[in-house]
Image: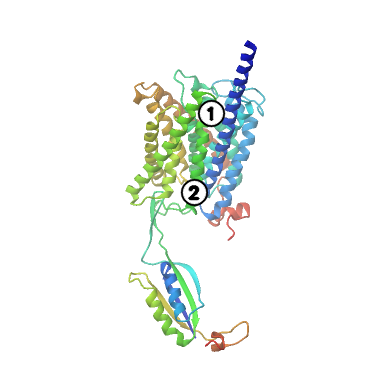
Amino acid sequence: MPDDIKAIESTLVDYAFSINTIWVLVTAALVFFMQAGFALVEAGFTRTKNTTNILFKNLMDFVIGTIVFWAIGFGVMFGSKNGFWGGMDLFMQHTYRTDMPDYAFLIFQTVFAATAATIVSGSMAERTKFNAYLIYSGVISLVIYPVSGHWAWGGGWLSQMSTPFHDFAGSSVVHMVGGMAAMVGAITLGPRLGKYDKNGKAKAIPGHSITLATLGVFILWIGWFGFNPGSQLAAAGVANAKAISLIFVTTNIAGAGGAFATMIFVWLKNKKPTLSMTLNGALAGLVAITAGCDAVTPGSALIIGILAGTLVVISVAFFDKIVKIDDPVGAISVHGICGAFGTLMVGFFSATQGLLFGHGATLLVSQLIGVASIASWALASSAILFLALKKFNGLRVEKRIEEEGLDIYEHGESAYNL
Amino acid sequence: MKKIEVVIRKSKFDEVKEALNKVDIVFFTFWDVRGVGQATEGRVYRGIAYDTSTIERILITFYCREKYMAPAIEAILESARTGEVGDGKIFISEITDAYRIRTGERGDKAMYLEGEE
C-alpha cells in the first residue's frame, strides 16, 4: 500500500512539473509574439520610406539576441559567480532549475531578453545605420541586459538585500533597460531631419499607418498576458493558479487604466481625443504594472495604470518639446519612464509590503535602489556602446539616405510596391 | 474643342460625376490632388498639434466639343457648390487638335462616335 501512495505521489509531482513546463512554454510563445507587436507599432509610427528597415531591425534583434543570449547572456544573468556578474556558461551547459526543464527556462528568458533589445529600434528609427543596429542588438543581449538582470533575477545583489528589490516581470529589468538604452541611442543620433524647425520648435512627423500601430498595440497587449502571468514560472496547484489569475487581471486593468487616462488627458490638452497618443497610454499602463502585477490589488492596478497613462503624455511632451530628444515611437517615455515609475509604485501599492498599506517605506527604498542602479548601469553601458559605435563605425546614415529613405539605400527594397 | 479642368471638394466627387453624366460628359480623368491655400486642416499627432498646410481636392479634367461646354459648366457649378470658401474653380482652355488613336480620325471627328451624335 505505501508503495502505491508513493507511486501516486511521484505521478502528481510529474504532473505538476509538466503543467509548469507547459505554462512557461505557452507564455514564452506569447512573449515572442510581442516582437510582432513591436514591429507593427514601430512601422506604423514611422514613414513608408523606412518601413523595410524598421521591420528588418525588429526581425534581426530577435535573431541575434536568440543566439548571443544562449551563447553567453544566459550564463551572465543566471550563473552564481557573484552578486554583480553571473559568470560564463557557454551555450548553457549547467543545470539551473529543478521545477521545469532548463530549456523551458532558457526559451522563456530568451524572449524576455529580446523584448528589452527590440524596444530600442523605435527610438532610433528612420536614421540609424543598419550594421550599427546589428552590433548594438548583439551587445544588449550579450551583456547590458544580462548584467542588471542578474542583479534582480539571477540571485544578484538586488535580490540579496534585506528587503529584496521587487520587479516581478521586468518593469525595470526589461522595459527600463530598453528605454534607457533607447534614450542614449536617440541622444547620440540626434533628431531626424525636419523634426525641429530653425527655432527649435518640435514638428510632427506623422507615422504612415495608425492601423498598423493599433494592431501592434493589441498584439503587445496579448503578449503581456504571457509576459506577466508567465513570470510566475508555475501554474500547478491552487496557489499558482490564483497568482496567475490575479496577474492576468491586474495586467489588463492597468492597460485599460493607462489608455483611458491618456485619452482623457489628451482630449483636455489638445481638444481632441487622439489615438496615436492613447496607444502609448495603453502600453504605459502595461509597462508600469509589470513590476507589481503579482503584489497589488486590481484597484491599485487601476490607479497605477491611470497614473502611468497621465505620466506618459507629460513625458512624451517633455522629451519632444523641452529636452528635444527625437523619439519617433515614444519608447523612452513608455518603457523607460513608465518602467521606472511602475517599479517605484510597488513600494507604495504592494499589498503586503507597500507604504500605502501601512508597511513602511523599506520596500520603497529597495525599489529606489533597484531603479537607480539598473538605470545607471543601462545608461552608462549603452553610452559606451553607442559612442564607440559612433566613433568606429558611424551610427547615423548620410543626409541623402535619410531624406530619400533607408529602405532603398540600405536594403535596395521598398516595403510598399504599389 | 475645349479642355476643362475643375478643382472640387473630395466630398462632392460623386455628385459632380452624376451631374456631368447627365449632360453627356461620360468620360473624364481625375486625380487626387493637394494644394496650398488659406484653409488648413488642424491635426494632432502624438501630442503635437499641427496643420497639414495642404488641402486635399480632386482635379477633374475632360475635353469636349464647344456645344457641350455650357451645360457641363452649369452642371458643375450646381453640383460642386456648398457655399463655403474652398468649393474649387473651373478653368477652360482652347484645344488646337485631337486624334482618335484607333482610327486616326482627327479634329472634331475624334471627339464623338459616328452615328451616336
Observer-nearest of A396 and A15: A15
Give whichever of discs 2 and 1 has the lower sequence position.
1
Q: Label 2 belongs to which residue?
A: A213
Looking at the rendered image, the disc whose residue lies closer to the viewer, 2 or 1, is 2
Where residue A83 sits, quadrant-wise, is top right
The answer to whether residue A140 shows anywhere in this view is no
Q: Residue at x 38, y 31 (%)?
A: A300
Q: Residue at x 59, y 83 (%)?
A: B100
Residue A373 appears at what percent x and percent y?
Answer: 47, 28
Q: Secondary structure at mark 2?
A: helix
The answer to whether residue A256 shows anywhere in this view is yes
Q: Which amino acid, mark 1?
A: Gly
* Mark sitting on residue A375: none
Q: Secondary structure at mark 1?
A: helix
**Residue B76 higher or lower than A72, as above or below:** below
Q: Chain of mark 1?
A: A
Q: Which amino acid, mark 2?
A: Ala
| Image quarter in which the N terminus of chain A is found | top right
Q: Label 1 belongs to which residue?
A: A149
Q: Chain of mark 2?
A: A
Where residue A101 sits, quadrant-wise, is top right
Observer-nearest of A329 and A274: A274
